[in-house]
């Protein structure tokens, strides 16, 4: 990994001397299943309506800072008020702003890793302590009693449902208990919420818990990772904080226009989401069959996102061979804490999933001989 130059290490804030310039090690591949994007084309009527909206958007004016039309559409989608919604430049910006507002030096964020690495990264940028209550090393179930205990002295909790990269969803009772236990803010990151079963979202709990924040994004089910639009739902005074700390023009006019069309056309996405859910089950069954056909130890976890976590022999090498010999990119977590031997595979189109299954069949068979 690249490091800062000696000169820069002297100039940046002392807690930032160890930061590394971002290098996603991205290699262009025929099939990219590494970033949990939606790999299906946008529904064609939605794409046409977005193109029309973009063409009609003046570029010479600053955006509406609060994106009120978009907030109204999002509020209507979730049965909430405009004042309970704040939009951001992707969910990432809102996670950063959450830490900016509610974290900070001498304050603690509680997480249940393995989870989305940006939480700890943003906490480190903002000098926030991270209290980690790890999940079970085999099942990845959260340690509920310990998390509830730790929540009592945390300023902030972030939990993820479905969790990235393990795919499991949290019991709503646990979310409610966290809201009671934590004197600060509890965020449930539902970036993958649309792919999960009915009834697992924490959005209906917002009316009961004034410290609950739910994060959503248009990057996954809505297939618009490129436009950078996420949003948080929370009580009005929590949203006031998000509105106060944000960079006022972070959601540009083109993003607002495209997002508005997407949110208003949400029913058009239902068949794609259904397809991804059924492909997820097919990919899961296919990988499970491959694992049981080889003598090597392996595992594929059940998940409710648009991805699967798998443990396979020699995972790092397998990921390289998928990339170099089959031009298929998946995400290697094998050296991340708690994820030894693990790869994360985004659920793609049927053709992409077939390509993964046949490549894995060849590579795992080759390992046997
Ligand atoms: N939360 C989770 C759990 C994620 O996996 C991601 C994206 N990988 C995000 C938030 C942020 O997504 P975006 O910035 O694209 O909205």
Image (cartoon, rainbow, N blue to C red):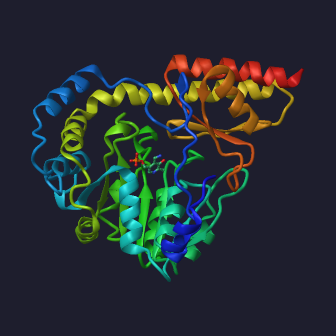
Q: Residue at x 57, y 62 (%)?
A: 5
Whether residue 305 sits left or right of residue 309 in the image: it is left
Quadrant of the image occupied by residue 271: top left
Q: Nearer the viewer, residue 333 or 149?
A: 333
Quadrant of the image occupied by residue 337: bottom right
Extreme-right residue of the structure:
369
Q: Is residue 347 visible to the viewer in this orientation of the structure?
A: yes
Q: Residue at x 50, y 36 (%)?
A: 306
Q: Residue at x 62, y 55 (%)?
A: 114
Q: Nearer the viewer, residue 76 or 171?
A: 76
Q: Position of residue 288 (x, y in %)?
A: 71, 29
| In the image, residue 136 above or below residue 6 | above
Quadrant of the image occupied by residue 104: bottom left
| In the image, residue 25 above or below residue 363 | below
Q: Position of residue 109 (x, y in %)?
A: 51, 71
Whether residue 367 sits left or right of residue 3 in the image: it is right
Q: Nearer the viewer, residue 53 or 110?
A: 53
| In the image, residue 69 above or below residue 211 | above
Extreme-front residue of the structure:
7
| In the image, residue 68 above or below residue 122 | above
Q: Position of residue 244 (x, y in %)?
A: 24, 69
Q: Quadrant of the C terminus?
A: top right
Extreme-bottom residue of the structure:
106
Q: Is residue 151 visible to the viewer in this orientation of the structure?
A: no
Q: Position of residue 228 (x, y in %)?
A: 33, 44
């Amino acid at each position: 990994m690249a490091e800062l130059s000696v000169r820069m290490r002297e100039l940046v804030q002392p807690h930032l001397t160890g930061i590394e310039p971002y290098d996603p090690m991205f290699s262009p591949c025929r099939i990219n299943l590494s970033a949990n994007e939606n790999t299906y084309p946008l529904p064609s009527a939605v794409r046409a309506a977005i193109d029309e909206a973009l063409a009609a958007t003046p570029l010479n004016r600053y955006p509406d800072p609060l994106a009120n039309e978009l907030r109204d559409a999002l509020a209507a989608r979730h049965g909430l008020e405009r004042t309970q919604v704040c939009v951001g430049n992707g969910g990432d910006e809102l996670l950063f702003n959450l830490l900016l507002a509610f974290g900070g030096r001498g304050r603690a964020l509680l997480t249940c890793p393995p989870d989305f690495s940006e939480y700890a990264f943003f906490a480190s940028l903002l000098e926030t302590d991270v209290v980690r209550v790890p999940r079970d090393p085999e099942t990845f179930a959260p340690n509920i009693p310990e998390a509830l205990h730790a929540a009592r002295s945390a300023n902030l909790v972030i939990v993820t449902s479905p969790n990235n990269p393990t795919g499991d969803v949290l019991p709503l009772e646990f979310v409610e208990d966290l809201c009671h236990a934590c004197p600060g803010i509890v965020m449930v990151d539902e970036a993958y919420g649309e792919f999960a079963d009915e009834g697992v979202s924490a959005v209906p709990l917002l009316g009961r818990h004034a410290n609950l924040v739910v994060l959503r994004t248009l990057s996954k089910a809505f297939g618009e990772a490129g436009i950078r639009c996420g949003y948080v739902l929370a009580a009005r005074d929590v949203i006031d904080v998000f509105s106060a700390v944000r960079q006022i023009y972070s959601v540009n006019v083109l993003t607002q226009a495209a997002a508005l069309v997407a949110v208003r056309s949400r029913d058009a996405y239902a068949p794609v989401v259904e397809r991804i859910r059924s492909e997820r089950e097919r990919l899961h069954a296919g990988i499970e069959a491959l694992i049981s056909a080889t003598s090597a130890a392996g595992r594929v976890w059940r998940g409710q996102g648009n991805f699967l976590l798998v443990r396979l022999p020699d995972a790092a090498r397998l990921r390289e061979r998928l990339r170099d010999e089959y031009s298929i990119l998946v995400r290697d977590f094998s050296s991340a804490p708690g994820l030894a031997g693990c790869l994360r595979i985004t659920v793609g189109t049927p053709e992409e999933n077939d390509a993964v299954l046949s490549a894995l069949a060849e590579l795992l068979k080759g390992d046997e001989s």
